[in-house]
Every structure is written in structure tokens, then in C-alpha cells.
Image (spheres, helix red, strand yellow):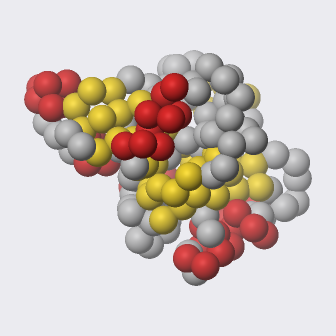
Amino acid sequence: MNSSFRCPTCGGTHDGAPTDHGWKLPDVVWNIPEEKRSSRARFNTDLCQLGDRFFIRCILKLPFNVRSGYYGWGVWVELSRDDFYRYVERYDQDGSHDPMVAGSIANKIPGYSESLGLPVMVQFQNSTSRPTVHVPKTTGHALADEQALGIDDQRYHAILESIRVTGSSS
């Protein structure tokens, strides 16, 4: 493993290995040709609307079980219109004690089958933190298991390799 990496978001070089990977947009929006994207969807780094579909950028944390910290998937989650606007209204407030809201993952995550559309729960956070994604155990999905049990270094390396192989950068 490299002792440093070049960040695709900021372009800078950081010490250690990457501990997160994110998407700039939901897959359905990213797949719109670039020259048409901004006329068909409204978006910034946190919010996205495509017609009557609403998305927010979140973080799905997989805790390391052999060291401190976590690996974070910076995914977009599709929410209902009402939950999207409730998030927008409370954007600068602490929503960490609000009830979780239902959504579905809007990105295909490398190394996981059927992540696109996976039902999840979202917990809003304070104004300086992205909402967190919780994958219900009842989904039977590998992300639910890894979120509950954590990942070891072997799995962490497999995640990094799946990103490298797929070239996932949307």
C-alpha cells in the first residue's frame, strides 16, 4: 500500500491510504451527457433534484475492526420530496436527534452487488457533518453486515482494489 495518495477531489497529496470514496452526483444524473446535465438537473455538492426525484449527499461508514476510524462511502441517497425539503429547511441546524428517514442509495458501489436502489435509513447530522446512512440488517446486504461488524485490513484492501479496477470516479 502507498504511504500517500493523490486526492481526486482536491488534487492534493495526502499521507496514508484513502479512507473514503465519494460520488459527485447520483448515478442517474451523472449518466446525463455533461452538456445537458445542468439544464436537466439542479445540483450542488450536497443536494440534487432531477424532475420529481430528490437526492442528498451522505456518508455510509464502515468501521475498521482492527484499528480506529472507518472507511466512508460518500454516497447519494434518494429521499421523498417531503424529507428532502425538511433536510433543506434544517440544513444549518442540528438534526442528529431527528427521527431517521427512509431512502435508497443512488450510486452503484464497487465490490457490492445490487447497491443501487438499496433501501437505507438516513440520520441527519449537525450543520458541519453530512447525514449518515444506516443499512438495515433486514436487507441481508453485505453493507449491513460490514456496517455492523466492521471491516478488517484484508477487506479494506479489497475495497481499494475494487475502486481501482472499476475506475469509479463519478
Q: In which image quadrant can residue 134 be found?
A: bottom right
Q: Is residue 147 visible?
A: yes
Residue at image position (60%, 44%) is: 59
Who is closer to the viewer here, 64 or 149?
149
Q: Position of residue 4 (x, y in %)?
A: 68, 32
Residue at image position (87%, 60%) is: 66
Q: Is residue 161 visible?
A: no
The quarter of the rendered structure image containing the C terminus is top left
Q: Answer above or below: position of 8 versus 58.
A: above
Q: Answer above or below: position of 50 versus 7.
A: below
Q: Position of residue 149 (x, y in %)?
A: 78, 69
Q: Answer above or below: position of 66 versus 127.
A: below
Q: Is residue 26 left or right of residue 28?
A: right
Who is closer to the viewer here, 143 or 122?
122
Who is closer to the viewer here, 77 or 80?
80
Q: Is residue 166 left or right of residue 29?
A: right
Residue at image position (62%, 69%) is: 136
Q: Position of residue 162 (x, y in %)?
A: 50, 59
Q: Position of residue 1 (x, y in %)?
A: 68, 48
Residue at image position (52%, 20%) is: 10
Identify the residue at the far right of this view: 67
Q: Count how many numbered circles sit on residues in the image.
A: 0
